[in-house]
Amino acid sequence: MAIHPSAIIDSKAEIHSSVEVGPYAVIDAQVVLGPGCWVGPHVHLTGDLMAGPNCQFHAGSVMGDAPQDGKYDGAPTRCRIGSGNVFREHVTVHRSNSMEEDTVIGNENYFMAHAHVGHNCRVGHKNIFANGALLGGHVVMEDEAFLSGHCAVHQFVRIGRLAMMQGHAGLSKDLPPYMMSTGINMMCGLNTVGLRRAGLSLSERTELKRLYHHLFSAKIPLSEAVIQGQELFSAASSQHVLDFIQGSTRGICKDVRQGSPVRGGQGG
């Protein structure tokens, strides 16, 4: 174990022998780090935090600190991080606000500088957060999504697999799988580049385009379009979109042609 002499590590912390710890890092008592982790300078790992193998915590990042929730009562809540995640400079991930639910991050996610994951979030696998991308509390994010620079996501929102948010976009409504968001709560079609890179077949991508048009260009209520879509579209990816929409409690983003994108600080 390579530990810089200026690092402060509580004797109760469970640190694998292969972990490297840089100067002025602070690792508190309840922290567990798996093999191959790298802790950079001025990192603070705190609270009931477990991180799997081969995670990187770059300079100034803070993991497992208390939730930013005025109702938090100091309960010993948890943060669980999988394997192969990269947290760049000054990324913050907060533990949950109650014992009933953890903050959970899956495997092989990449968080660029100043990204933030709020309390009780559930982030899947292989997602990318560009600089300054922010998740409020209780956000659920599936796999392989991409949040561009300085995106903001309201609490309790869901983001589907392979979805993409353009720079400075905001969400207070759910963004379905495979879709691209722009402005505030608006969609501008499929994440076509992401779908190709993920290996979705041409036939599946073509069906998703037809599904998008059916759901968001038709002059019928979305709920009716979803029911019709269950019969019209058979690909697994299409059914994933339909199931995601049916499970929404916050509502679904609209296509830009259904209304003018809201700019500035409005939620819409």
Image: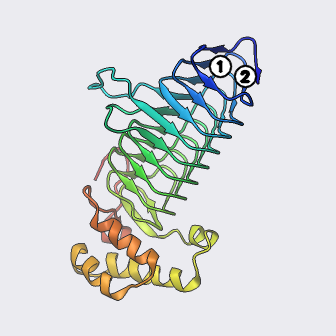
Of the numbered discs in the image, which one, if any, rests on residue 75? none
Task: Give the residue number, with chain letter if any, for mark 2.
Answer: 22
* The furthest residue to the right: 2
Q: Looking at the picture, how far across and down is residue 58, in whole percent? A: 66, 32
Query: Label 1 belongs to which residue?
Result: 25
**Colour mapping:** rainbow
Q: Secondary structure at mark 1?
A: loop
* Residue lying at 35% horizontally and 45% vertically, measured from the top left: 154
- Residue 227, horizontal then vertical, whole percent: 25, 80
Disc 2 residue type (three-letter)? Gly
Query: Where does residue 14 sit, x and y in percent of width and height?
Result: 60, 24
Give, as a three-letter code, the residue at label 1: Ala
Q: Indicate left or right for 108 with 18 as reference.
A: left
Residue at x 51%, y 57% (from the top left corner): 166
User: Dot 2, how many residues are within 10 Å of its Cα: few (below 14), some (14-19), or many (20+)?
Assistant: many
How far across and down, in percent of the image, does residue 91 sit? 56, 34
| Secondary structure under the numbered disc 2 in the rendered image | loop
> Could you tell me how many numbered marks the image carries?
2
Residue ID at (34%, 82%): 214
Quarter of the image where the N terminus is located: top right
Q: Is residue 145 depicted above or below 108 in this figure?
A: below
Left of 64 or right of it: where is 7?
Answer: right
Q: Are marks 1 and 2 in contact (CB under 8 Å)?
A: yes
Looking at the image, residue 121 sits to the left or right of residue 215; the answer is right
Please rate how many residues cluster around mark 1, counting C-alpha atoms within 10 Å: few if below 14, some from 14 to 19, many from 20: many
Report, in whole angstroms, how far the alpha carbon at label 1 lies from the one at label 2.
6 Å
Establish if 60 lies above or below 268.
above
Q: Quadrant location of residue 254? A: bottom left
